[in-house]
Amino acid sequence: MSPQTNERAFEVHVEEMLLQRGGWQSGTNAEWDVERALYPARICAFLEATQPKLWEEMRALHAAGLENLLINTLVKELNLKGTLHVLRHGFKFYGKTFRLAYFKPAHELNEEVLALYAQNQLTITRQVLCHPGKHDTVELLFSVNGLPIATCEVKNPGTGQSWRHAVRQYQKDRDTRAPLFGFKTRALVHFAADPDEVHMTTRLRGQGTLFLPFNRGSHPVEIQCGAGNPQHPSGYRTGYFWEEVLQRDSILDILGHFMFVETKEEKVDDGRGGQRRVTKEAVIFPRYHQLDAVRKVVAASREEGPGRNYLIQHSAGSGKTNSISWLSHRLSSLHADGDRKVFDCVVVITDRRVLDQQLQDAIYQIEHAQGVVKAIDQDSKQLAAALIDGTKIVITTLQKFPFVLRGLLHVAGAETQEKATVEEKAQAKAWENEIAKRRYAVIVDEAHSSQTGETARELKAILGAGAKDDHEGEADWEDQLNQVMASRGQQPNLSFFAFTATPKGKTLELFGRPGSSGKPEAFHLYSMRQAIEEGFILDVLTNYTIYSTYYRLLKAAEDDPALPKKKGARALAKFMSFHPHNIEQKTEVMVGNGVKSSFIDLRFFR
């Protein structure tokens, strides 16, 4: 078998998996418009089938010119607002709104919406022209209702090529000016894949294009999990990608409820000695462990209902801000069997200042609705009101953590005696009675987990004698949460979702679930080893030099005739002295040596 045939064989196998089991249908190059980067006939067929009354109304106005006029309007809207916006909210045409996709609702009460969702047409096309006026082709093109959403270059090690060659192909051979590759205006994500690994990017920048791993990890759910993928029943390690991630319901769920455009303001050098603010955008596509964690936690919450605890052990560099945003949004609209809402309110306890605005922006892009998220930035009364006024998601800080627990756990016997007027007591009682009736999902984030002394004292007032500081002083967020859970136990109306990179033993005991060894384990795991091997964080032990070793190196340097004796003596004297601040000096040596001896090109990921 020739190398080209070998590569085509894998490509054909991928297509067959998607066509036979993934809910996709085959597209053709004959219907592809490379100049406008879409399938005009498929778009018009979908609009006519799903919105017949509006279609007939427009046909009466524009007669035979409707199709071309409509496609030209759509192209302008795509270039202005982007693919994601148009898929979710449609586009305006002569004062009317045409919808280009329908997403599965959180509940099954609306049969009409479910019927429209079933009419979405997912198309996969092989060897599609990608540059107008040229013969270059992209190996796989994925489309929804005629609109491109993703491209994929597939390589096979049997040809001597891997996903790395696909990455270089995107970097060197793909013209970012081509309509298909326009940032957020056509294909939203680009995959580089082979039988063993998958990598992705949401923006092509030529040689500067950065691809992120989209892999399960070498040993999923295990601490020793590293980069890569385990064996898969399909015979290809990337079988999970073709059979699960790209499955019809899955990819529509990602488009409808996960992806969003992140906007940030940054200061840059203006070239004249000053700075100016620039707005930067990035299309966010979930990494595999984020997608997997959110979906598994949501599925378990739907099945188990309120009153359960979940420990999500995700390493630094895992993108916990986005994971918490997605999870809080999904939990806020989660329905169980019988279309009963599982949680009345989601409370997110964090000090991540970006989470508030980011969550509001992401939810607005998904739902086009304001008021879903309320940030508590005033006082405890504002928080208490938010817990009972129908707000879906409440974001508060760790400093308000004790008040949240006092309100939510009152039904469990948290009796705090405070000075209050009769009116205040009556209001508090009304709040407490209302809170006791409602079901809450409490997401606790470890980020920036320092606590003030006042916070620690308030917590003790809630917990009574059971609350103790740790041996180093005031208890950190994890100790406080553990003390609350140990003193009050699980409550039928509260589910806790704790995010941490390095859980303590007590945290595992209270929040973990029995694993194969019988010992408690995290509900979901993204290991530090995987984060290191995938390049999201650095391995601090790689170039670690202990203090005594450094001292020996300096001693050897003093005996070296090539080194001036006075310089060596001064350095040695500094470290041989028993100064009261010796520990600080050791730290100075370690940090100073690291700064002078190495410059690390750190890949920055969310």
Image (cartoon, grey):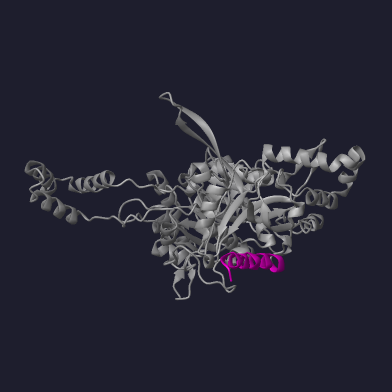
Farthest residue, direction bottom = 517
Q: What residue is rendered at 9% in x and 50% in y?
A: 560
Residue 482's x, y, as percent?
44, 59
Q: Residue furthest right?
A: 60
Q: Is residue 13 magenta?
A: yes
Percent position of residue 44, x then y: 81, 48
Query: How many labels, in total?
Result: 0
- The secondary structure that most of the magenta stretch takes on is helix
Q: Quadrant of the N terminus?
A: bottom right
Residue at figure coordinates x 35%, y 47% from the top left: 600
Q: Is residue 263 left or right of residue 268?
A: right
Vertical placement of 117 versus 420: above or below?
A: below
Residue 426 visible in the shown view: no
* Residue 454 x %, y %: 40, 44
Residue 55: quarter of image:
top right
> Image check: 167 left or right of 139?
left
Q: Tell me where the magenta segment starts and ends, as one range.
A: 1-21
Q: Is residue 113 left or right of residue 309?
A: right
Residue closer to the observer: 280 or 467: 280
170 vs 43, nearest the viewer: 170
Q: Indicate yes or no whether the magenta region holds residue 17.
A: yes
> How far across and how far down the image is residue 506, in percent?
41, 64
- In the orientation shown, which residue stands out farthest toward the top? 272
Q: Is residue 67 above or below residue 221?
A: above
The residue at the point 75 percent across, 59 percent down is 108
Q: Is residue 48 visible?
A: yes
